[in-house]
Image: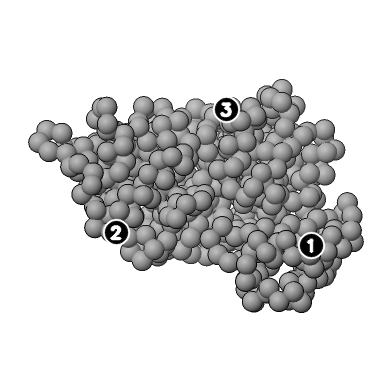
């Protein structure tokens, strides 16, 4: 990860960590970079945050000042920007969103012409330019003049084409299915209902009234308890909850149980295997996936690979090894034959496909995945690498792993942005998780490297 761009874009509090000038400078660089040999074309989407409009204007100013044309999808989802960038021959795409973060944060996600997260070579160039601009060298890139100045183009038709693409993926009508949708007052507020209505579902929607400051507030995939209550109160067959920019989806089954990304990987992976379309019969997960998923996949004979946390790494592994299904416990699910990134609406449609074709409720389809209790604590330390390699800490981890055997696991990993280590344990009981995590944290305390437990 770089100075400004992490695994999921440049993110920070609007006009504090991520300012309007940052957006202008990103636009300036992209317009120049892609416009060296032709007039650059860049497609832009945004979520419903109040600051998204400000950042959109700044990006457009930077792009057009460098000679690029900026095509505006307006309020839309991150996956739609990915789809349009690759299908409509754009040089790159930009999504303005901080995903599941609160409204006062925002982010700029960059997508290449293949609909994938932008490569490090371009990000490194942008970061270098931002630093030069901060040092007073903002004009080191040429400005477009005369007829070479770029223009801003309304491109809402692209968003509508993406909706049409989603509808085309459904294998049958959802007539008779009662489906709940939690739009998180975000990007799907106008899209989700229209998709499911078009497919014949009896659609029940909550949190689709954005006001610029209520995105993700006690709703969406990070507050799934609201959809659990909604499903049970209305006797729904299934509920889907999206995050602010709809690149992830969690579900609630007919009995009110939470269906995590791990459950979704199992349900869709088994269905794809049975249909003969799982390719090499391997699923890509991250190290945060629950041991319950792996035991269920082992029982099916489906293989898996584990990557670092981040759908970016899942996608990279899938491309490198030819896998066509992967994702995260948080609900970023990638169907490699249909998309190059996580897509919440697409995920909901694929779950509905399994339910309709198998004629089974989601509670039955997901039941083989028995999730193990999991506990994670964030620990502030003096030095992350020194603590990870401290003999006393390593010994505590080994002792905890020996205690758990094959019925649990320990995960100790670094935060990418803070002086924090994340200590996680999975075991057959919450008590055993707490015992193992506290044992490791006590070793950090004894070594003198622990500052505090967050």
Numbered label tally: 3
Q: Which mark is residue 134?
A: 2
Marks 2/3: CA distance?
Answer: 42 Å
In this view of the protein, can residue 172 be seen by the observer? no
Q: Is residue 238 left or right of residue 182?
A: right
Looking at this view, name the residue that lies furthest to the top.
276
Quadrant of res 202: top right
Which residue is located at x 36 percent, y 49 percent? Answer: 128
Depicted 390 relative to depicted 278: above or below: below
Badge 3 density bin: few <14, some 14–19, many ≥20, Cα 10 Å: few
Callout 1 secondary element: helix
Query: Are the two marked residues, 2 and 3, in contact with CB atoms closer than 8 angstroms?
Result: no
In this view of the protein, can residue 402 be seen by the observer? yes
The mark lying in front, picked from 3 and 1, is 1
Marks 3/1: CA distance?
Answer: 41 Å
Badge 1 density bin: few <14, some 14–19, many ≥20, Cα 10 Å: some
Q: Is residue 23 left or right of residue 415?
A: left
Sequence-first disc among 2 and 3: 2
The residue beneath circle 3 is: 337
Looking at this view, name the residue that lies furthest to the left.
146
The residue beneath circle 1 is: 394
Give the colouring mode of the picture: one colour
Depicted 434 relative to depicted 326: above or below: below
Q: Is residue 210 left or right of residue 405?
A: left
């Amino acid at each position: 990860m770089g100075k400004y761009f992490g695994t999921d874009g440049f993110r920070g509090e609007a006009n504090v960590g991520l300012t309007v000038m940052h957006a202008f400078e990103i636009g300036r660089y992209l317009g120049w970079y892609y416009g060296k040999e032709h007039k650059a074309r860049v497609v832009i989407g945004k979520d419903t945050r109040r600051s998204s409009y400000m950042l959109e204007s700044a990006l457009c100013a930077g792009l057009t000042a460098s000679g690029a044309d900026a095509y505006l999808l307006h309020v839309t989802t991150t996956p739609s920007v990915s789809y349009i960038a690759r299908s409509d021959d754009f040089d790159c795409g930009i999504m303005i969103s901080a995903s599941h973060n609160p409204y006062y944060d925002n982010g700029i996600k960059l997508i290449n012409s293949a609909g994938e997260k932008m490569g490090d070579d371009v990000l490194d160039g942008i970061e270098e330019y931002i630093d030069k601009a901060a040092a007073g060298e903002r004009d080191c890139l040429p400005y477009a003049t005369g007829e070479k100045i770029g223009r801003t183009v309304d491109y809402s038709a692209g968003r509508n084409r993406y909706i049409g693409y989603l509808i085309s993926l459904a294998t049958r009508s959802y007539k008779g299915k009662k489906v709940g949708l939690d739009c998180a007052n975000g990007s799907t507020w106008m899209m989700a209902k229209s998709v499911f209505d078009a497919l014949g579902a009896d659609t029940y929607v909550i949190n689709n009234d954005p006001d610029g400051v209520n995105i993700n507030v006690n709703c969406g995939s990070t507050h799934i308890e609201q959809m659990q209550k909604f499903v049970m109160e209305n006797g729904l067959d299934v509920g889907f909850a999206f995050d602010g920019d709809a690149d992830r989806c969690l579900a609630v089954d007919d009995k009110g149980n939470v269906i995590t990304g791990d459950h979704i990987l199992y349900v869709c992976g088994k269905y794809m295997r049975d249909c003969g379309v799982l390719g090499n019969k391997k699923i890509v997960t991250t190290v945060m996936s629950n041991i319950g998923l792996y035991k269920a996949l082992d029982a099916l004979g489906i293989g898996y690979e584990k990557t670092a946390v981040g759908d970016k790494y899942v996608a990279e592994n899938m491309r490198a090894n030819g896998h066509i299904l992967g994702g995260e416990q948080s609900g970023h699910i990638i169907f490699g034959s249909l998309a190059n990134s996580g897509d919440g609406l697409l995920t909901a449609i694929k779950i509905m496909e399994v339910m309709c074709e198998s004629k089974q409720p989601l509670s039955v389809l997901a039941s083989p995945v028995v999730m193990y209790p999991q506990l994670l604590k964030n620990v502030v330390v003096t030095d992350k690498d020194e603590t990870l390699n401290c003999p006393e800490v390593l010994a505590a981890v080994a002792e905890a792993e020996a205690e758990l055997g094959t019925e649990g696991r320990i995960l100790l990993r670094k935060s990418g942005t803070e002086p924090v280590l994340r200590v996680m344990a999975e075991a057959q009981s919450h008590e055993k998780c707490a015992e193992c995590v506290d044992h490791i944290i006590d070793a950090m305390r004894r070594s003198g490297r622990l500052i505090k437990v967050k």
